[in-house]
Image (spheres, rainbow, N blue to C red):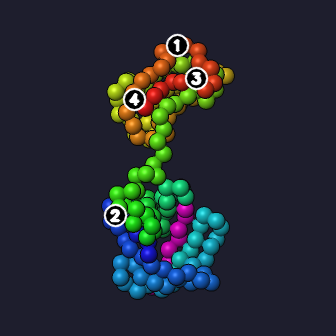
Amino acid sequence: MYSITINGGQTLKTDLNVANNEFEGTLNDAIIKGNFEKINPYQFHFLLNNKSYNIDVIKLNVEEKTLVVKINSVKFNLQLKDKYDELLHSLGLDNLAIKKVNDIKAPMPGMVLNILVAEGEEVKKGDALIILEAMKMENILKSPCDGTIKKIAINKGIAVEKNQLLIQF
């Protein structure tokens, strides 16, 4: 049994059996049956209830169980959960798998061009934190997780060495 959340809103429950390019099972308690062809590792053609669906996998994150797919030219963001994810959620243990990062260190020697955050500021995963110039290229260091900036250990315009502490969460 899986649940699929579409674009952060509607959730579908599904239980499918797949064999020999055919599938059957339930989708929100409705019985479904069809077949599919794998065109390449990221493209599929499905036939369901005499309707044809071309599916392109645009982005796949196995660790977070997320997908961005294009179904007949319409993009969908999907979040998958299996019975174990549902159990962890019901027990309140689903946030334990979130990677906790305490600090950001310089990935290479370089010059700090800009600091885009301040101490005490809350950041989300993927937010830009620092612009570091290395070998005449600007590198944007992004937050690896959600958190609050506890301390900024460097100043704009200084040179840093590899693995030097930049930010503490």
Disc 2 to disc 3: CB gap under 8 Å:
no
Alpha carbons under labels 2 and 3: distance apart = 40 Å
- Residue 145: tell me if it is visible: yes
Amino acid on which disc 1 is placed: Gly
Q: What's the residue at 35%, 61% (across, down)?
A: 91
Amino acid on which disc 2 is placed: Ser
Give the crowd class for mark 4: few <14, some 14-19, many >=20 residues within 10 Å. some
In the depicted view, which residue is nearer to us: 96 or 11? 96
**What range is drawn magenta here?**
48-57
Q: Earlier in the sequence, mark 4 or mark 1?
A: 4
- What secondary structure is found at the residue carrying circle 1? loop
4 vs 2, front mark: 2
Point out the image quarter for the N terminus: bottom left
Q: Position of residue 152 (x, y in %)?
A: 44, 22
- Residue 137: tell me if it is visible: no
Amino acid on which disc 3 is placed: Gln
- What secondary structure is found at the residue carrying circle 3? loop
Give the crowd class for mark 3: few <14, some 14-19, many >=20 residues within 10 Å. some
Give the crowd class for mark 2: few <14, some 14-19, many >=20 residues within 10 Å. few
Alpha carbons under labels 2 and 1: distance apart = 48 Å
Disc 3 to disc 1: CB gap under 8 Å:
no
- Quickly name the residue at label 2: 90
Q: Label for residue 164?
A: 3
Q: Position of residue 118 (x, y in %)?
A: 38, 24
Q: Position of residue 57 (x, y in %)?
A: 55, 62
- Quickly name the residue at label 4: 149
Q: Judge whether 71 appears above or below 145 on screen.
A: below
- Quickly name the residue at label 1: 157
Q: Earlier in the sequence, mark 3 or mark 1?
A: 1
Q: Judge whether 107 appears above or below 3 on screen.
A: above
Alpha carbons under labels 4 and 2: distance apart = 30 Å
